[in-house]
Amino acid sequence: MDWNCSATLIGSLPHMDAAKAIDLILSSGIDVPAWPQLPSRGYAENMYAQTGVTLPGIRIDGEKKSITVDLNDYDPMEFYTALLSEDIDYYRHPEEFFGGLYELLDRDLEGFVGIKGQVTGPISEGLQIFDQDGRAVIYDETYGEIVRKNVNMMARWQTRELGRKNSNPILFFDEPTLTMLGTPFASISQTDAVTWMNEAMDGVDAHTAIHCCGNTDWPMVMSTDVDILSLDAYAYGHTIALYPEDTAAFLERGGTLAWGIVPNTEEGVAIETVDNLVRLMDIHLSALADKGLDKDLLHRRCLLTPQCGLGGVEVEVVPGVLELLSGLSKAMKERHSLS
């Protein structure tokens, strides 16, 4: 799909009040509103807790800020019964964990280019849930599969609900730990990583996206079945031009680059302007065009976002980020005659 420099959000906001957060998003001028995680409300809105809440045997401890499971003491029967019967409603997102999602679903969303949701991707989720011995469950063959199936079914449930409000949903799989692949902190092969991400995206009736807020192996990510690659372009935008052939193939098969070009810090918002960000985008796009990529295709297969989530900033900073984001989107559309 041609997104034509439309704007959307990544992950979280710092608000306590879900209604005020959604009011701000819907009035900001962005084309693809997203429901926000609201971690200031408590640990239930942590991205790993949200995606892990329907796992069998899961123990979410808000005081210790930990998510664990005793692999010697859990019953997967109900989980697998729902999975095998494709009972998507079993994986319904609990309202106390998803304030932003349910508030967004209460609104009229038909007039927007699309709407965006997210789950934590299977690799990051599996690396942040620990067993009784303190080992990440991704390394347990049985429970690692359960995590992947859970991510997939939660994504399918969420996509169904979003699709009832807008016919053009995007579902992001947030994978911050892709930056650690190949290190002792994530001893996972590229083959397994690709297979597991594809498994989590399988059957999800939406434009799928993988978001990584650091530098990683972009050709590996683009080799998955994903539709949208989301990167922190404000810090790492230059890295995508290191892989012109992979990027060209990704775009030509219908892929989109989501450029996280708007800073998500108070300091960044204070120094940046829309004109500055337009120039930065032109630098990154020209770097790819200079290596033979079709610049018109780059503009059409382009989404614009903040670097990452905004849960770590003060509430007062968020309007400035959204103003830069919507202003950049409008400027890019006008500059390149995009509708």
Image (cartoon, rainbow, N blue to C red):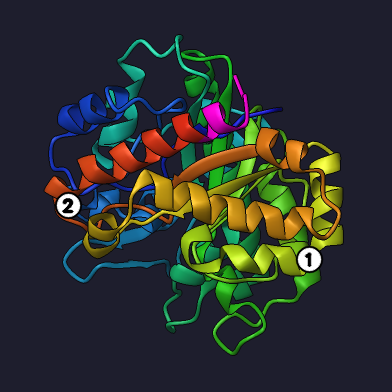
Residue 26 is left or right of residue 148, and the answer is: left
Q: Residues within 10 Å of mark 2 (few under 14, many from 20)?
A: some
- Camera-nearest label, 2 or 1: 1
Extreme residue in the bottom direction: 184
Q: Position of residue 305 (x, y in %)?
A: 46, 45
The residue under label 2 is which amino acid type?
Ser
Which residue occupies 59% across, 51% down? Answer: 282
The residue under label 1 is which amino acid type?
Tyr
Quarter residue 126 falls in? bottom right
Q: Position of residue 142 (x, y in %)?
A: 65, 64
Image quadrant in which the N terminus is located: top right
**What is the CA distance from the residue labelled 2 to the residue labelled 1?**
38 Å
- Give the residue at mark 2: 40
- Give the residue at mark 1: 243
Magenta-span inclusion, residue 235: no
Label disc, if present, on residue 339 of the rendered structure: none
Q: Is residue 126 above or below residue 327?
A: below
Q: Position of residue 101 (x, y in %)?
A: 34, 31
Which residue occupies 70% across, 70% down? Answer: 217
Q: Is residue 66 above or below residue 296?
A: below
Does residue 206 appear in this view? yes
Mark 1 element type: loop
Image quadrant in which the C terminus is located: top right
Q: Which is nearer the N-term, disc 2 or disc 1? A: 2
Q: Which residues are magenta?
A: 332-339
Q: Is residue 167 above or below residue 31?
A: above
> Residue 71 or 333: which is nearer the viewer?
333
Q: Position of residue 278 (x, y in %)?
A: 49, 46
Residue 140 is left or right of residue 226, and the answer is: left
Which residue occupies 87% across, 50% down? Answer: 249
Which residue occupies 35% across, 10% down? Answer: 108
The answer to whether the residues at label 2 and label 1 have Cβ atoms under 8 Å apart is no
